Image (cartoon, coloured by chain):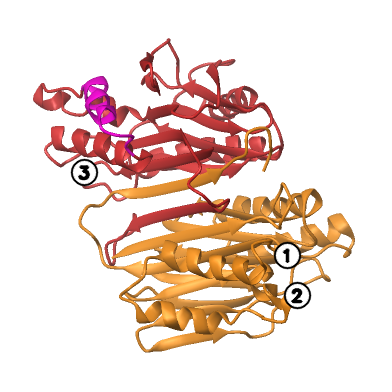
Chain colours: A red, B orange
Amino acid sequence: MEIQIAAAKVNKYATSESGDTLEVVERPNGGLSVVLADGQTSGRGAKAVSQLVVRKVIGLLAEGVRDGAAARAASDALYTDKRGRVICTLNIASIDLHSETIVLTRNNPSPMFICRETGIDRIDVESIPLGTSRDVRPSITEIAIEIGLTIIIYTDGLVHAGKRRGQPMNTMQVLQSLLEDQSPSPQMIADTLLAHAVSLDDNRPADDISVLVVKVGSRDGDNVRRMTVRLPIDAGTRI
Amino acid sequence: MEIQIAAAKVNKYATSESGDTLEVVERPNGGLSVVLADGQTSGRGAKAVSQLVVRKVIGLLAEGVRDGAAARAASDALYTDKRGRVICTLNIASIDLHSETIVLTRNNPSPMFICRETGIDRIDVESIPLGTSRDVRPSITEIAIEIGLTIIIYTDGLVHAGKRRGQPMNTMQVLQSLLEDQSPSPQMIADTLLAHAVSLDDNRPADDISVLVVKVGSRDGDNVRRMTVRLPIDAGTRI
């Protein structure tokens, strides 16, 4: 088997810094965790908040702390630091090779999607962001690693895309038409969802948008781990 | 412009865990850093060492500490923890959008390569691993971000490939023939170097091998940041 992870991120229009932070960390007992946080508002302040949360979570995961406990610790740290006045959403997708499961930790009102050959599940149980109060609990979903499984996670920029124009994003519909194709790559799924959202916002995203896709595929031959990052930059402009 | 980063990693033959750790972190003042460490020996002990070093470095970079200072702090931490008995190589490749340069920090006897349209430079100034003594200094190279620049960094598994059979790797030669092609992608460069090394080791790598390639290309249109990870797993086997 092969775990394939893809992410696509875009900043709010005319904003030089994204309030979303996405990072990947190796788990000390085998596997990887992808951590995605979206700090309240946008720009530099939001970036500092989402970086604080991601850094806290990643540090704890690297020490072997369980995902749920890491999310709760990050929430307490944020609540203490900002006295409950700043919130931040958090998603952790962990490929846990110790338990041979994918563990999805969610403190984010935005739904996530779990796709299998049998259909697409929209996971939308109530989930509140970090930093809102003491003792915020994440919603945790644990599923066996099996070929064909695809998980889609995103920040609320995708949820709100198009609302300004009264044409909200229908993520389920876009996903359904995508998955009718023959096994789209995770990058294609992430890119298509993001492009759809950006077009609904007239190519001027009303918020930072990040889409994360995790797919369990069959092995394509070798046992090489690979990673790529593409970072567009404007000369003279920080992003 | 677009910064493209690619990495390819393989474990030592019949070893379930790589002693190499590679992670990417966002820089608080804009840009990214890729951190690659190779812990002494292989397997679980080496992994713990390289993770300790990468974690320390990433934590400091996220706080805004300069790359050279982060490397020295990681060396002191390793020296203190292991009393000078365990060493670890370290490379940091930072896309620093504040200074608009790429900063290459190196504590690794393995060379690195800087390719421009005018030719390929092999950077091989003496550089010692972390943890060998107090006050280990990194070798630092800072270069302007310009289109066509390609940087190749690797761990010593690549240097030692083929030596067992008396057919050592000639990285410069492989790079030269690769770069004669029309602008190979960073993933193709990393994959080709890794595949060459693995074949010299009779498809049974004598050590963990990691190859990291950073390339500055022209923008291909949109302003979307992208990341992909591919993690091959054997059912029932931790990697």
Q: Quadrant of residue A155?
A: top left
Quick check: can you spot residue A104? yes
Amino acid type, callout 3:
Tyr
Give the residues drawn in magenta, as a range: A170-184
Residue A55 image point, x, y percent: 56, 41
Judge whether A157 appears above or below A226 on screen: above
Q: Quadrant of residue B164?
A: bottom right
Left or right of residue A3, residue A26 in this image: right
Residue B138 image point, x, y percent: 66, 74
Say which residue label 3 marks: A13
- Residue B164 circle label: 2
- Residue A143 circle label: none
Of marks 1 and 3, the one in the foreground: 1
Amino acid type, callout 2:
Arg
Query: Is residue A59 covered in magenta?
Result: no
Of marks 3 and 2, the one in the foreground: 2
**Are dots 2 and 1 in contact, CB under 8 Å?**
yes
- Residue B206 circle label: 1
Dot 2: element: helix
Left or right of residue B215, residue A26 in this image: right
Judge whether B22 appears above or below A67 on screen: below
Disc 2 from disc 1: Cα separation: 8 Å
Judging from the image, mark 1 belongs to the subunit labelled B
